[in-house]
Image (cartoon, coloured by chain):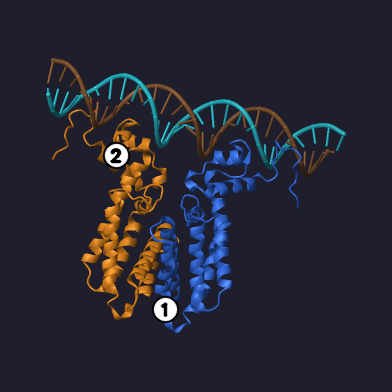
Chain colours: A orange, B blue, C brown, D cyan
Amino acid sequence: MLPVSRSSPAYHHGNLQAALEDAALELLENQPAARISLREVARRAGVSHNAPYHHFGDRAALLGALGVRAMADLLAAQEEAVARTSGPVERVRALGAAYVGYAAAHPQAFALIFDPEYCAAGQPSQEMAPLIARNEELLGGQVAELVEEPRFAGSDPAALAASLWSTVHGMATLVVLGHLPREAAEPALVALLG
Amino acid sequence: MLPVSRSSPAYHHGNLQAALEDAALELLENQPAARISLREVARRAGVSHNAPYHHFGDRAALLGALGVRAMADLLAAQEEAVARTSGPVERVRALGAAYVGYAAAHPQAFALIFDPEYCAAGQPSQEMAPLIARNEELLGGQVAELVEEPRFAGSDPAALAASLWSTVHGMATLVVLGHLPREAAEPALVALLG
DNA sequence: GCTCCATCTAGACAGTGTCAACAATGTGGA
DNA sequence: TCCACATTGTTGACACTGTCTAGATGGAGC
């Protein structure tokens, strides 16, 4: 289905919603979400400063939509890493490396996913909730295989999953912030998983 | 040394710098650093909207000073926990619990410490740097004792410290954000440390 | 061809961070 | 003692922001 109409560049943009998200995503590569202004996004999309309000309730809604896009990418990176790796321990390591890798490659987008201002965990948006669920299933599945390994036999899967997520998330956060050198992530994960 | 002068309430406040920090800290209990406005802080301190500029270069400097205060508290919580606990594994667990406990009790302050907008890890302020160093020493010391334990013999101390910090920091972050229930933190830490 | 509605524009408002200019206050040197 | 001066306030202004209200535009279906 082609965009409905592009005849008049001035009015009725065609797909302004996507254009606004694209413009914002571009800004997000070089500055944190907090510094992205709705008016600058509108300027980039070539529309008036009020046009976004016909597609997003407010500024937070736009940033929230961006967060959903980012979360989809983060999830995809983990799924691909798991798919291309064999062995339970190796797969968990690959998943973690993909998580940290995404954060390092797109620090602002990663931060946005976990920014309570735009992506509150309490009430996830309709688009965000299924992504979170899929990510939990992905990790849960890997942990279920992990506890079959003798090294992790007897571990509570839920507690193990929580601690693995914590470790990987903390690593990603600290690397992004510059508190931990990027090269320290891999050995640290190995130190934990063996 | 008493405050130099308090004769005139209108001019020469006495210790406006501290009063501003106090007012901001109060605001920080109920809202994230990003939403704290310099003008509101000034209003709370009972001075004009420009008075803060004689004590802080800009808004970020005030928030940065607040971050230093928060970091000092976080460090103190860990030191106290370690001091009152015996046994290498138990001490590391206590340190982690204190870290997560501080984050849960003061979520906005904790977030501020790691907010790159105000507390960039790259160039820490003169006041922040020694606190970070002390925290690294504290953790390093505990890990040094931990690797003496048979369960952790042969582990690379640096990698172990990095992964422990990552786990605890990730846990604190995820608990604060509401992605992980508070009760899940303790078992998860136990699952890792045994 | 006319009407309706989603979409976009223009204008206004309160709030913000920051700069410049000015006023009051306390201090050290003549 | 008095006076320059640095410190610490104040007021006013500017550009920018998010968001509200009104009005203009143009495509879709009767």
Q: Amino acid at mark 1?
A: Ser
Q: What residue is at 53 percent from the left and 44 percent from the top?
A: B59
The answer to the question of whether label 2 and label 1 lie on touching residues, with beta carbons closer than 8 A, is no
Q: Which of the 4 image quadrants contains residue B79?
A: bottom right
Q: Point out which mark residue B183 bears.
A: none
The chain ID associated with circle 1 is B
Q: Are marks 2 and 1 on the same chain?
A: no
State the residue at coordinates (44%, 62%). B182
**Height in image: B84 above or below D6?**
below
Location of mark 2 (residue)? A20
Q: Which mark is residue B155?
A: 1
Q: Tell me the chain of label 2.
A: A
Q: Residues within 10 Å of mark 2 (few under 14, many from 20)?
A: many
Label 1 crowd (10 A; few <14 / some 14-19 / many >=20): some
Residue A103: quarter of image: bottom left
Closest to the observer, B161 or B149: B149
